[in-house]
Image (cartoon, rainbow, N blue to C red):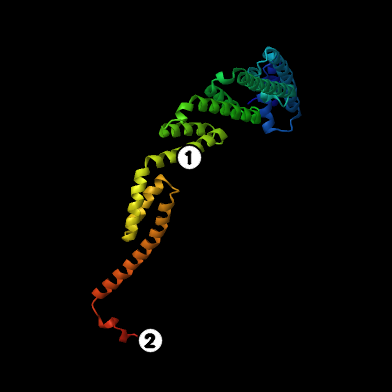
Amino acid sequence: MATLKEYENQVKLYMTEENWTEAYKICTKILSYDPENTTFIRLSHKIENEVKKHNLKAIQYDLQQLDHFLTEHNYEEYLRKIAPLQIYVKDYPEIANKIVGAKKLLDQQYEAKRNQAFHEISEEIKQKGDSLDYQITLQKLDNLYKLDIRKSEVKNLQKTVRGSYIRQQLQLNKGLLESNRFEDIIIFLLKLKKIDPENRDVKKVIDRIKSVYQYYKIENKKDFIFKTIEEIKTLYITRKYELCLELCERVLQIDPTNAVALKFSAKASKKADRQSMKKIFTDIHENFKKFPQSKDFKEKNYIRI
């Protein structure tokens, strides 16, 4: 087994050869058994200092090799390349300063790009006007919004573009909106409402179309309504209240404000309820008669106070 002196000589030999790793291993091994050994403590400190000097030169060289990324403003690549050096930050604070500086520059670069993207799309909206491709523009604005780029301003632009698109579509489909193709009109308006649920122009058109459609239905079903109203009156007089209510409902589906149908619906509903209750009591009475007269249930078997 080697003596301490032999281990000391071995460490010094490794140091002469600049084999710092092996030299330090021996020091660490000896100090694990003899923590107060001044010789090996001194040797380990010397090794640490030499290693630190060596690493400093290597780090400075590596940092110089990365400088061109900063010159080229390629901050993402710079940060990627410098990342492995972070383990030496404690001994070489310069690395941390370089990383912080590069991150700030990268943030500034991102901010400049975001502002540029916002500026470009704002100018495009102003210049193209009605010839703007609204679908693509709205998609671009949506991407900016998701990236948290000037959110309030992007939101205002989205509202402006949606409003312009909706006005354009309403104008282009003016013929459809003035026709009697109500199913197609409803589908068209629902699509516009999906784009901007709060758009006032769409709401106005929907209210107008509802009114026109209601009038259209009433006009087309005028004969049906007249005949049905007469039948409602007959059914009410003949006390056929349930059928009367069914026909009132049919009329009100076409014309919800029909005064006659509303009147007879209310009256027939009350009569039908009374008629129903009367039938229930009658059925109970008839069923009671059918029960056998058991002695157990005769009145004389109960005590009244």
* Total marks placed: 2
Write down the quadrant of residue 109 in the picture.
top right
Q: Amino acid at mark 2?
A: Arg
Q: Nearer the viewer, mark 1 or mark 2?
A: 1
Pick the front one: 221 or 268: 221
Q: Is residue 271 visible?
A: yes
Circle 2 — which element? loop
Q: Which quadrant is the N terminus positioned in?
A: top right
User: Residue sitting at 67 percent across and 14 percent down?
Assistant: 69
Q: Amino acid at mark 1?
A: Ser
Residue holding disc 1: 211
Residue holding disc 2: 304
Pick the front one: 103 or 66: 103
How packed mark 2 is, by other alpha carbons closer than 10 Å (few <14, some 14-19, many 20 or more), is few
User: Residue sitting at 62 percent across and 27 percent down?
Assistant: 157
Residue 22, position as x, y percentages in the image: 65, 21
Q: Is residue 251 left or right of residue 139?
A: left
Circle 1 — which element? helix
From the viewer's perspective, is residue 63 above or below residue 208?
above
